[in-house]
Image: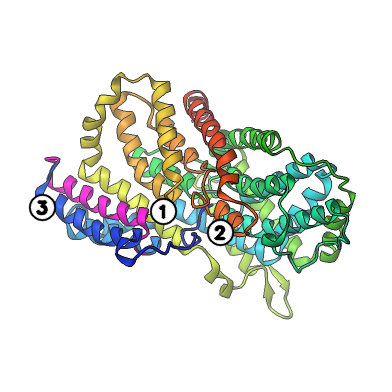
Amino acid sequence: MEFPEDQPERDDAPPLLRRETIGLLSGPLVFGLVSIFEPFFLPTTANAVLAGTAWIAIWWMTEAVPIPVTSLLPIVLFSLSGAVSVSEATAPYADPIIFLLLGGFLLALAIEEWNLHQRIALSIVARVGVSPNRLLFGFMLATASLSMWISNTATAMMMVPIGVAVVAQFTSMQHATTGAAPTDDVPDAKSLPRSNFGIALMLAIAYSASIGGAATLIGSPPNAVFAGVASSNLGIEIGFLTWMLFALPASAVFLLLTWVLLIALFRPEPIEDTEITDAVQEQLAEMGPLGRGERRVLYVFILVAAGWILRPFVLQPQVPAITDTTIALIGGVLLFIVPVNLRERTFLLEWDAVSALPWGVLLLLGAGFSIANAFQQSGLDDSIAQAISIFANIPVVLLFVLLAAVVVFLTEINSNTATATVFMPIMISLGLTLGIDPIQLMALTALSASFAFMLPVATPPNAIVFGSGYLTIPDMVQIGVWLNLLAIMLVAALAYLWVPVIF
């Protein structure tokens, strides 16, 4: 799951040449030019939406101002230009998908608050790791599993210190030095000698965080953008289970392919890893037995996850009005009323902790839904549909591959949520014009936006792992370009063959 506030540091270019400065000036300039000259001869309201969307997209891509701040512009620009009313511009910010994510964020926050995620990760690694390759897979499985339910940013930040500690233990064994078991004092990754195993392990953490997040609606914001736009613009509900049936197999297959490719390209050195496994077991022992808070958070998590999965078959026949959002919010409220120590009035989650929620992500999603609604209300989607009818002669399979490639490589330099937000309404128009189910193109966009692996700036997990100082950009590009190509082919095939079966 991407957090707009977690981005790499800016460059040191002269102020007037910085991307942010150029974007800050060009956004309103393009808005003014499109508004005044109406270069595409659109109806007035459609032209106003196009101009506003251009300004918003430029500021998102250049990060001229913080992404959440830009996400407030649809309310201002669309209402003042007369494209839609204020109430129509603001209503999408309260879309049910927003509250589904809010409930998911609260659950993730409680899991992090009681350190349950670290226990889960260490337990998986301890049970799987009996060789370098299996240890690598254990880290990937743990990272992907956590990223399905908590943000991929938080997952990467938690797994990197564990990974660095394991790399340090491996290095000490390789150099026959005294290697103490990892402790809370995490080694400095920059000072560690580089090894094939270390490079593969750090890359595995970054990539599996993104791959795992793609598997659930709450795991990555582009998935939520897809569900929200499908509901508001097409009247189609994308349930939690429905998305998992589509994306979980894709994530599982891609996780295995990534593991195989990491081993093939980097060939981790053979090691006797009993000391590493012992070190992980020692960390688990230091955590002690499962505490009361951890147990109760786990119970709430199981309750919510079971509700999402069983809703269509068990819950909805009894309570027709129940939705995934309702279940998420029930779980969120429970976190504030289930006690850990009633005498001390300690609960699973305190309101003060809510300040750590990624409110910017919710604003970004709201902006995406507002833009999609404005496209529909103003008729801009119909105008775009007529303009892109030139694609009618391209074979559908080739079109899917081209669209997946555009989204994947654009995400390498742009926020994946912003990319999905801008593309979703266009995909609806393209699908309706060409006689292709828009859901196929929208699902393709959502999944492609989570699969960018070449550059540190592509995703927050990439940036976090690169920021540890252990990896170089060539390390990421060496495997990332192959993963991008695999992702393009896999996503195109899934959109063409699997989406019609599931949706």
The reply to whether dot 3 and dot 2 touch (C-beta < 8 Å) is no
Can residue 151 be seen here? The reply is: no
Whichever of callouts 1 and 3 sits on the residue coming sooner in the sequence is: 3
Which label belongs to residue 16? none
Q: Residues within 10 Å of mark 1 (few under 14, many from 20)?
A: many
**Is the magenta region chiefly helix, strand or loop?**
helix
Relative image position of residue 220 (x, y in whole percent): 52, 48
Residue 245: percent from the left, percent from the top? 58, 34
Q: Is residue 257 magenta?
A: no
Q: Earlier in the sequence, mark 3 or mark 2?
A: 3
Whether tag 1 and tag 3 are in contact, CB under 8 A, the answer is: no
Residue at 57% x, 62% y is 106
- The residue singled out by tag 1 in the image is 365
Q: Secondary structure at mark 3?
A: helix
In the image, what residue type sits under mark 1? Leu
Residue 64 lies in the magenta-colored region: yes
Q: Position of residue 60 (x, y in %)?
A: 36, 55
Q: Foreground: 350 or 129?
A: 129
Whole-percent x, y for residue 379 in the image: 21, 41
> Circle 2 is placed at which residue position?
105
Segment tinted magenta in the rendering: 40-65
**Image quarter of residue 387:** top left
- Type of the residue with mark 3: Ile
* Element carrying mark 2: helix
Q: Give the vertical position of 367 relative to 244 (above or below).
A: below
Q: Are the residues flagged by discs 2 and 1 in contact, CB closer than 8 Å?
A: no
Task: Please tell me how crowded label 3 is: few (under 14), some (14-19), or many (20+) other residues with Cα within 10 Å.
Answer: few
Residue that numbered label 3 is attached to: 36
